[in-house]
Amino acid sequence: MPVPPYDWCMARSVEELEHATLEGVVSITDEARAVVLEALSGEPEPESLALWLEVRGVQAGNFVYDLYFQALRDAGEEDAVFLDEGLAVVVPEPSVARLRGARLEFSEDGGGGLVLVNPNHPSPEEAAPGVPPEVLAAGLEGELARRVMGVLDDVINPSIASHGGRADLVAFDAEGGVAYLRLSGGCQGCAMSRMTLTQGIEVALKDEVPQVTAVVDVTDHGGGENPYY
């Protein structure tokens, strides 16, 4: 007698999930799985938990991720849920396309840790929110854009490097003279970054490249080490 399709939404434990046939989104190496399972064994009621993987946002042009344990029963109908060699994994629906084909590995770098190797990358709009698509499409090959990057490299970045800061040109509107910058290091998430931008960087750029009319900060300050809101 054929077995009826199993509704994974009914699953409350790894044992129940084993009855479902579900497509995996992310692959996990044996070493990474061993690390996760060891950590999971130290959690209360580990049989009810899943490893949740999701894209938290975009930082410095790349996806950043959250990996954590949460109850399997919290997964929604649109989330991707699958079993990987006894490990229940949940990828929330907004992250499925962004993580499809990624691989969770264990790396020895920096003392060792889990790393997501992801073939997917943020779209230009995600990587540089607030920049008009036509400006992004124009690239940074123009003469004025190169001059702005030269000022950043030779004048501005050496001066803000003392507190670990850096400014990079993301896009340049040659027609309007608007430079779109991303701040990183000590400038990302720093409450003083607006002053640094308007009273330091913008003034220096306008002095060196008079065609610059405005500077726009496209930094994700909420993703820095010292985020402010």
Image: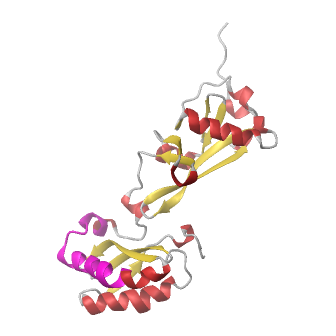
Image position, residue 221 (x, y; %): 53, 73
Q: Is residue 162 found left or right of 42 in the rendered image? A: left
Q: Is residue 36 above or below residue 86?
A: below
Q: Is residue 22 found left or right of 166 in the rendered image? A: right
The quarter in which the N terminus is drawn is top right
Image position, residue 187 (x, y; %): 49, 78
Q: Nearer the viewer, residue 64 or 122?
A: 64
Q: Which is the main secondary structure of the residues drawn in magenta? A: helix
Image position, residue 228 (x, y; %): 60, 76
Q: Residue at x 43, y 80 (%)?
A: 161
Tell me which corner region of the image, top left, top right, bottom left or bottom right, holds residue 160.
bottom left
Q: Is residue 58 above or below residue 195?
A: above
* Residue 14 on the magenta segment: no
Q: Nearer the viewer, residue 127 or 159?
A: 159
Q: Residue furthest top?
A: 1
Image position, residue 151 (x, y; %): 28, 82
Q: Is residue 180 above or below residue 195?
A: above
Q: Is residue 15 found left or right of 91 in the rendered image? A: right
Q: Residue furthest right?
A: 44
Q: Is residue 51 above or below residue 17?
A: below
Q: Residue at x 62, y 41 (%)?
A: 90
Tell me which corner region of the image, top left, top right, bottom left or bottom right, holds residue 22.
top right
Q: Residue at x 74, y 26 (%)?
A: 15
The quarter in which the C terminus is drawn is bottom right
On the question of residue 222 being in view, the answer is: yes
Range of residues picked out in magenta: 135-157
Tell me which corner region of the image, top left, top right, bottom left or bottom right, holds residue 202.
bottom left
On the question of residue 77 being in view, the answer is: no
* Residue 136 on the magenta segment: yes
